[in-house]
Image (cartoon, helix red, strand yellow):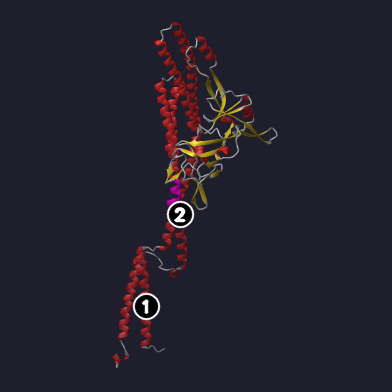
Amino acid sequence: MRVTNSMISNSAQSHIGNAKSSLLKYEEQFTSEKKIQRPSDDPTVAVRALKYRSTVSQITQYVEKNVKDAMSWMDTTESALKNINSVLVDMKGYLNQGANDYLAQDERNSVLSVLKQYVSSIFEDEANSDYSGRYVFTGYRTDTSLLFSEATKNLTYDIKENFKYTDIGTVNVVTGNVTYQDGNSAQDYADQMTKIQKQSFYKIPLAYKNCSKASYGSVKGGNDTQENYVTLTSSYKDAAGQNVTKTYNTITRASSDADAYDVGDDEVIYLYDTGEVLVGKNVYGELQENQAEFQVNYCKSEFDKSDIRPEMYFECQSYNQVSKKEINYSDPAEQTIKYEVNFSQNMTVNTQGMDAIDTDIYRTIDYLANVINDVDDVEKRISDADKMIANCKDPAEKKNLEAYKESLETERSLRVTVMTEAFGKGLSMVDKAQEKLNVAVADLGTRYSRVKLTYDKLSDQKVDVEEQLSNNEDVNISDAYINMTQADNLYQYALTATSKILGNTLLDYI
């Protein structure tokens, strides 16, 4: 076969081109530290790289954002719940003082002031907690605070509050009082004293005091003028397993009415100003015997600053008396906010206020404040009686005043007994509130542990996938340097050989 100079030249150029391409390839690998620069270099490596990068991106989203955000949300919730529990423990100490010792006026009012501050701390500071501008205890309504931020006079709510038969407690009330009247005899005061009694009633405390005497329908401007619009509806299963529903009509009164606490055996009394429903012993017995769940439907207008928004705890309707707008709120139970924390794994991050923070916390303190005010009032009357006795010159009138004071002291004894019992009810309230709180904390802790395990698992998985990604597309820098050096040497040798070969022709030998 005849080999021409042209063939040698073309072959040499081809080898130089191949050597240069090889040098470029290894130089790019060395400088970029990647096996390929484009999918066509190695389609298998390219496909694997896309898969690994997608997986890393998803895991990074979960680990760095979703899971951390979920854990931060739950950390905020846990901190608030632990602070509430700490406040309840402190409240218990003050309540224990009043339950075991007689407190003078300054002492009991100081204790009451501290307890009210504790209640404000629980609801205003902790129950209204937010995470990144989202309220953590308000279910789906994370943009709305749990409490009214200011006094609201233009909203009226029709509230449906649910209870269990175990929620019915007793309230002790001293009915009647001894009052001074000029010209009254000692016998008159003795007669007044016979009308003063300490009575116990079966009580259902509503979530609010100062409820509305008017019905929701009448507030809206309708023709609903019925007096007994508040209803108590119970539901239970009878002996045959059939669902039974029974509605009790109520009698609306104010606690200041003379007959406020005249509760018949089959009656239900709604005290709108104190926010209490009193039930007769037959009604109580029926609810207890059937272990019934029941619902009280009532109306509430005019909310004070820091009152709980009804829609956060209850199924209700609201009516704006200015805009005439009506909104229906469904039962807020189980408004769970879920975060996707792993592939096809969602986790509930929120805890609702209604599931953790009992409204009895402030209602019990309201009741305690009322009985303390009653004791303060009777002690003021005793102080006034002492002044009148000291200034009285008429022996007969002085005797009447002493009888008046004696009756007052008997009244004070009854009211102090009720006050001491109210402090005891406060201790029971704290125990109940802590029990509810502990259930919420335990549930939150269980969910947090699962998220933490997921975080640890994803962190390890991220390291593994990143290592697989590196093995797939990264080059060993030492090997890359050796390959590039060899390619450079080959290129240089090719140039040297070509220069020698192309430099000689047939003319050089003629």
Provide residue 39's location: percent of width, then percent of height: 44, 68
* Residue drawn at 44 percent across, 48 percent down: 69
Q: Note whether residue 334 is visible.
A: yes
Which residue in the rendered view is the most extreme toward the front? 183
Provide residue 13's location: percent of width, then percent of height: 36, 81
Tag 1 residue: 17
| Magenta portion: prevailing SS class | helix
* Residue drawn at 40 percent across, 68 percent down: 37
Identify which amino acid the numbered label 1 is placed on: Gly
Count neighbours of disc 2 (C-alpha within 10 A) and say few if under 14, some if 14 to 19, many if 20 or more: many
Provide residue 313's location: percent of width, then percent of height: 52, 39
User: Quick check: 232 left or right of 399?
Assistant: right
* Residue drawn at 44 percent across, 70 percent down: 40
Identify which amino acid the numbered label 2 is placed on: Ile
State the count of labels.
2
Which residue in the rendered view is the most extreme toward the right? 240
Which residue in the rendered view is the most extreme toward the top? 395
If you read the primary sequence from the N terminus, does the residue marked by circle 2 or circle 1 appear first? Answer: 1
Q: What quarter of the picture does the C terminus occupy?
A: bottom left
| Mark number, residue 59 | 2
Q: Which residues are magenta?
A: 59-71
Q: Secondary structure at mark 1?
A: helix
Whether residue 39 is situated above or below residue 373 in the rendered picture: below
Residue 278: name its quadrant: top right
